[in-house]
Amino acid sequence: MIKAREGDFVETFEGLIFDVKGLVHPPDRVIAYVRYVPSKKGKRKRRNGRFYEKIYSLDERNKFLSENYPEYIYFDPIFNQLLEGVPIKKVYKHYKPEEKLREMRLKSQNLAGIEKVAFEFAKLLKEKAGIPWTKIGISGSLLVDLYNENSDIDIIIYGTSNGMKVYEVLKKLVSLGTSIKSYDENGLKKLYKFRVKNTEVSFEQFAKIEERKIMQGEFKGVDYFLRFVKDWYEIAENYGEKIYIPIGRARIKAQIINVDEAIFTPCRYLIDDVSFLQGNLVYPLTEIASFRGRFCEQARVGEHVIAQGTVEKILQPNDNVHHYRLILGGNPEDFMILAEDDQ
């Protein structure tokens, strides 16, 4: 039995490295998406001497597995779609961000380069927010020793209370103009080019949201992204208790009425005053959600947004009730921007 969650990585016996998605997994498999693959042409080298290549987009990941390792693509009967996932019996190693940070603490005097900067950032946030070392970790390429000089810093914070403490500290540090900075216009343009390739979102629309985010930015000149994840005891849902049925694409306009989970991954926004601009009308559509960190901090209470994604029907068989949500991030054309009312 492997207890894996968002921010963790798993490695297979073939040497494939997957990043874990979400907090709810089937009993025999970890829902995770391939990220690094062994390649003679790869430019990232592990300590075992093996070279790796990083796969970025969801389409590229699916294509690679379909052509080389189709056993890691499966149809999930609860989420009712094809997902990438690693059977428990195929997991060679389970990488945990909090364990990585503990290793870095033990050799902190000998760290250099991006490892040193990442440790300093984690230590600063930990000490300023007053959270335990066990509730903060380092994910991404640093976690699996596949970083290079252009890598960014991925910090994970566990638990709602710890997350809110770190978020408030981060907000204060950014406002003071310390070594932590939000992205300037050049940084936003770079981000826009990377993220918004297939959407109708203009740079101006993108920048209005992204420039006010603090979960992403630069620490001592190195890009960072903070990911807030619920702690184990806060995860109320077990696999199979809800059934998710995709029913089609839609574009909606709605008002945000609750952002309590807007900084967490998965993130969720409760909505009201929903109107359908495209797609079939469903009722009640009560939330916008995403498993992608890029959709965190996307809107505030009272704001009106326009969002495009996949509508899912969520069934709770035991209670014989259902509602709908708009899920973002599974399609490159998904987006969420401020409506003209709030621009």
Image (cartoon, rainbow, N blue to C red):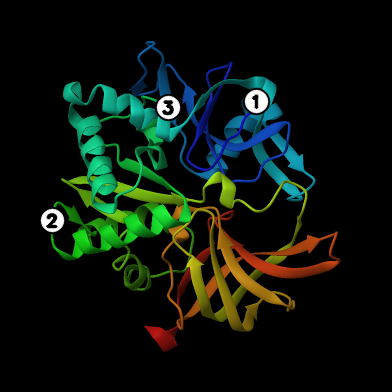
- The answer to the question of whether label 2 and label 1 lie on touching residues, with beta carbons closer than 8 A, is no
Instruction: Examine the rendered structure and indicate whether residue 296 appears above or below residue 220.
Output: below
Q: Point out which mark residue 101 bears.
A: none
Residue at 64 percent of width and 38 percent of height: 84
Task: Tell me which label, 2 or 1, sits earlier in the chain.
Answer: 1
- Image quarter hosting the C terminus: bottom left
Instruction: Examine the rendered structure and indicate whether residue 119 appears above or below residue 45.
Output: below
Label 2, on which residue?
178
**Of the pair 176 and 105, the residue shown nearer to us:** 105
Label 3, on which residue?
53
Give how far across and how far down residue 297 sits, in percent: 41, 65
Give how far across and how far down residue 164 sits, in percent: 39, 60
Mark 3, residues whose alpha carbon is within 10 Å: few (<14), some, or many (≥20)?
some
Give how far across and how far down residue 186 sits, in percent: 21, 58
Mark 2, residues whose alpha carbon is within 10 Å: few (<14), some, or many (≥20)?
few
Task: Tell me which label, 1 or 3, sits earlier in the chain.
Answer: 3
**Of the pair 251 and 222, the residue shown nearer to us:** 222
Task: Tell me which label, 2 or 3, sits earlier in the chain.
Answer: 3
Report the amino acid beneath label 1: Tyr
Residue 184 visible in this rendered orientation of the protein: no
Residue at 59 percent of width and 16 percent of height: 13
How far apart marks 2 and 1 lie (CA) works out to 46 Å
Label 1, on which residue?
69
Which mark's residue is nearer the viewer, 2 or 1?
2
